[in-house]
Amino acid sequence: MSMNDASALPALPGALRLFLAPLPLAPLEFALQRLVTSVGRRKPGLFARLGRQGDKVFLVDPTDLPFAFLMLPRRDGPRIEARRRDNSDGWDARIAGTLAALLGLVHGTADGDALFFSRDIVIEGDMEAVLALRNAIDDTELDLVAEMAAMFGGKGERVERIARRLVPMASRLSGLTLTRWDRS
Amino acid sequence: MRSPHVPELVCPAGTPAALRAAVDAGADSVYCGFCDETNARNFPGLNFTPAELGEGARYAHAGGAKVLVAINTFPRAGALGTWHRAIDEAARAGADAVILADIGLLAYARERHPDLRRHLSVQAAAANADAIRFYVEEFGVRRVVLPRVLTVNEIAAINKEVSCETEVFVFGGLCVMAEGRCSLSSYATGKSPNMNGVCSPASHVHYREEKGELVSRLGEFTIDRVPRHEPAPYPTLCKGCFSAGDYRGHVFEYPVSLDAAALVPQLLKAGVTAFKIEGRQRSRSYIRDVVTSFRRAVDAEVAGEPIPPGALQRLSEGQTTTAGAYRKTWR
């Protein structure tokens, strides 16, 4: 599947945003930190490719969600923090777009330049850092289903098998690319 | 009618993942560069270490594709070793050819690695038969990448007069200037595309929302400003919007990209050996879509079938495409 010929990317329904808005961020941040730590161990090449740009702070801002993420992709211990939009300062570079656009970039169904020029994503701040992050993620060929399953250690394989059965329907319902393009 | 010969589809790879995507999508050759100023796409997070190039070459060869290594910037005085090492590393990694622009590097490659094919980069701007013959006779160049300033008829005329292969761009970003001789970015940023390997370096590019408009700047220069629903402006001076006298607009070049898919039959008749897709700075998603589209176009032409319509406009820089100089018109 490719998003490159899509004329418009889906946005999550406003009702979902309203439902998520009052929820506490700590459980989400805990889960995401575990995921990022696991990715850091399994994909060291991502951080090598980032080079000195890994010292920067990135705000990843899914505009159809009521919160954003501060990412600190440090080679010796990557960190992620969930933030409300009114408390999301302190970044070097901001990458904003719908969750569909951001997941499309991670999973290799969308092209960053095309999304930028069509204004489906907005980039602010340190362009050098953004380019390095985009290129490093694109080369890493991440698959978030596989990465999430890996967090379960020995049970990961079983978790992944179950998740892969659910992903096609979840993708159809949400319009999101939930797994790597060649595994969907 | 079937095509007179089967062209080579030469595809970009900025990362090992992009290389695999290009090979899997049907590239005949993949071109790439090292993570330094020896190639003209020296962008952050892009390119190959020598070890990655070796692995990439093995992957490409297993898939029946060749690997061409671009070492196509001009060495800085006193720093030749960096460029010489790049040629040595390319040979060691199993590259099928090096793409060079500088005559000193061509001489070095010919002397040290005589069996390694030498291609002349578009950065050398060899735009006529005499210039090309010089590179062929003096440095044993086997293929010349033609500058993007020639019409199809001019390309045909050159092919009648030269003994080497020619390669032309069929898709991707365009340069308005003769490649290798443009100083616009150097003037604005102090970094030379031709020596440091990066036009409009990201470290000097800034986008900012101002009064409902998106403004792009390169260093101290405002390049363009566009209202909310227009495509984002391109970050190079050559595609900027300026005032000159009473005229306000794209003084040098419109922000469009090349798409010569429809010209594949004419370019083949003009004797072109290889079709090149620009975009080492682009994602594996772009590579997969563009290579697949051109693979279909080339295969259709070779089989004597109509070329299927492409849908690549959204992938082009500026979101608009042109046939470039191949169909030259004047404003």
Image (cartoon, coloured by chain):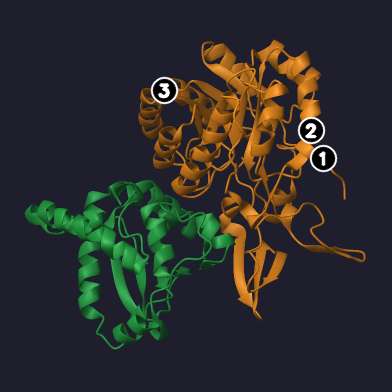
Chain colours: A green, B orange
Q: Amino acid at mark 1?
A: Lys
Instruction: Give the SS element for disc 1.
Output: loop
How many callouts does the rendering have?
3
- Residue B160: image x %, image y %? 77, 15
Residue linked to disc 1: B328
Q: Is residue A11 visible?
A: yes
Q: Amino acid at mark 3?
A: Gly
Q: Is residue B38 visible?
A: no
Residue linked to disc 2: B151
> Upstream in the sequence, badge 2 or badge 3?
3
Height in image: A125 above or below B116? below
Classify mark 3: residues with Cα within 10 Å, few (<14), some (14-19) or many (20+): few
Identify which residue is drawn at 38% across, 78% down: A13
Residue linked to disc 3: B64
- Residue B319: image x %, image y %? 63, 56
Q: Amino acid at mark 2?
A: Thr
Mark 2 and mark 3: Cα distance apart in space = 32 Å
